[in-house]
Amino acid sequence: MNRPKPDNREDNVAHLQNNIENTIRNYRETEDYLNEHRDEISSVEKNQLQDKNERRLNSIEGFREEVKDEARNQNK
Protein backbone atom coordinates (compact mmCIF):
# COMPACT_ATOMS: atom_id res chain seq x y z
CA MET A 1 0.00 0.00 0.00
CA ASN A 2 1.35 3.42 -0.95
CA ARG A 3 1.51 5.81 1.95
CA PRO A 4 1.76 9.55 1.54
CA LYS A 5 5.13 11.07 2.26
CA PRO A 6 5.33 12.79 5.63
CA ASP A 7 4.93 16.56 5.53
CA ASN A 8 8.50 17.88 5.48
CA ARG A 9 8.32 21.63 5.80
CA GLU A 10 12.00 22.23 6.49
CA ASP A 11 12.77 23.58 3.05
CA ASN A 12 9.46 25.32 2.29
CA VAL A 13 10.96 28.78 2.74
CA ALA A 14 13.76 27.97 0.29
CA HIS A 15 11.24 26.69 -2.26
CA LEU A 16 9.07 29.76 -1.80
CA GLN A 17 12.07 32.09 -2.19
CA ASN A 18 13.01 30.26 -5.38
CA ASN A 19 9.44 30.70 -6.67
CA ILE A 20 9.58 34.42 -5.84
CA GLU A 21 12.88 34.86 -7.68
CA ASN A 22 11.66 32.96 -10.74
CA THR A 23 8.40 34.90 -10.86
CA ILE A 24 10.21 38.24 -10.55
CA ARG A 25 12.59 37.22 -13.34
CA ASN A 26 9.66 36.25 -15.60
CA TYR A 27 7.92 39.52 -14.76
CA ARG A 28 10.98 41.57 -15.69
CA GLU A 29 11.58 39.61 -18.90
CA THR A 30 8.00 40.25 -19.96
CA GLU A 31 8.29 43.96 -19.12
CA ASP A 32 11.51 44.16 -21.16
CA TYR A 33 9.82 42.36 -24.06
CA LEU A 34 6.85 44.72 -23.91
CA ASN A 35 9.12 47.77 -23.85
CA GLU A 36 11.28 46.55 -26.72
CA HIS A 37 8.47 45.34 -28.98
CA ARG A 38 5.59 47.61 -28.00
CA ASP A 39 5.08 48.79 -31.58
CA GLU A 40 5.39 45.32 -33.08
CA ILE A 41 2.93 43.31 -31.01
CA SER A 42 -0.84 43.35 -31.23
CA SER A 43 -2.95 44.98 -28.57
CA VAL A 44 -4.39 41.54 -27.76
CA GLU A 45 -0.93 40.09 -27.09
CA LYS A 46 0.06 43.19 -25.12
CA ASN A 47 -3.07 42.87 -22.96
CA GLN A 48 -2.44 39.16 -22.41
CA LEU A 49 1.14 39.81 -21.30
CA GLN A 50 0.08 42.66 -19.02
CA ASP A 51 -2.61 40.45 -17.48
CA LYS A 52 -0.07 37.69 -16.96
CA ASN A 53 2.28 40.11 -15.23
CA GLU A 54 -0.54 41.30 -12.99
CA ARG A 55 -1.13 37.69 -11.96
CA ARG A 56 2.59 37.34 -11.33
CA LEU A 57 2.53 40.33 -8.97
CA ASN A 58 -0.36 38.74 -7.09
CA SER A 59 1.57 35.46 -6.91
CA ILE A 60 4.64 37.20 -5.53
CA GLU A 61 2.51 38.80 -2.83
CA GLY A 62 1.03 35.40 -1.97
CA PHE A 63 4.45 33.74 -1.85
CA ARG A 64 5.72 36.45 0.51
CA GLU A 65 2.76 35.88 2.82
CA GLU A 66 3.51 32.15 2.79
CA VAL A 67 7.15 32.87 3.72
CA LYS A 68 5.93 34.93 6.69
CA ASP A 69 3.58 32.11 7.73
CA GLU A 70 6.39 29.55 7.49
CA ALA A 71 8.70 31.77 9.55
CA ARG A 72 6.02 32.09 12.24
CA ASN A 73 5.46 28.31 12.26
CA GLN A 74 9.18 27.59 12.51
CA ASN A 75 9.48 29.92 15.49
CA LYS A 76 6.83 28.03 17.46
Image (cartoon, rainbow, N blue to C red):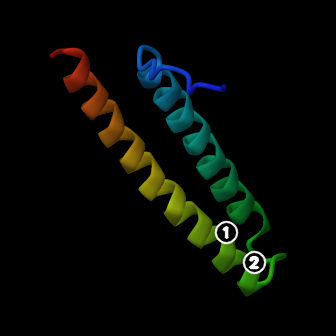
**Quadrant in which residue 46 is drawn:** bottom right
From the viewer's perspective, is 67 left or right of 3? left
Quarter of the rendering occupied by the N terminus = top right
State the residue position of label 2. Answer: 45
Q: Nearer the viewer, residue 32 or 24?
A: 24
Q: Residue furthest front?
A: 1
Q: Nearer the viewer, residue 73 or 44?
A: 73
Instruction: Identify the mark at residue 49; answer none if there is no mark.
Output: 1
Query: Pointer 1 and pointer 2: residues touching (CB < 8 Å)?
Result: yes
Packing grade of label 2 (10 A; few <14, some 14-19, many >=20) is few
Q: Residue furthest left?
A: 76
Three-letter amino acid code at the position of disc 2: Glu
Taking 11 as reference, is 23 above or below it? below
From the viewer's perspective, is 2 left or right of 57? right
Q: Position of residue 70 (x, y in %)?
A: 30, 27
Residue at the image point whose x is 34% and y is 31% from the top: 67
Three-letter amino acid code at the position of disc 1: Leu
Instruction: Identify the mark at residue 1; answer none if there is no mark.
Output: none
Q: Position of residue 73 (x, y in %)?
A: 23, 23
Q: Nearer the viewer, residue 26 or 34?
A: 26
Residue at the image point whose x is 60% and y is 70% from the top: 50
From the viewer's perspective, is 62 left or right of 56? left
From the viewer's perspective, is 57 left or right of 69? right
Q: Secondary structure at mark 1?
A: helix
Q: Residue furthest bottom?
A: 43
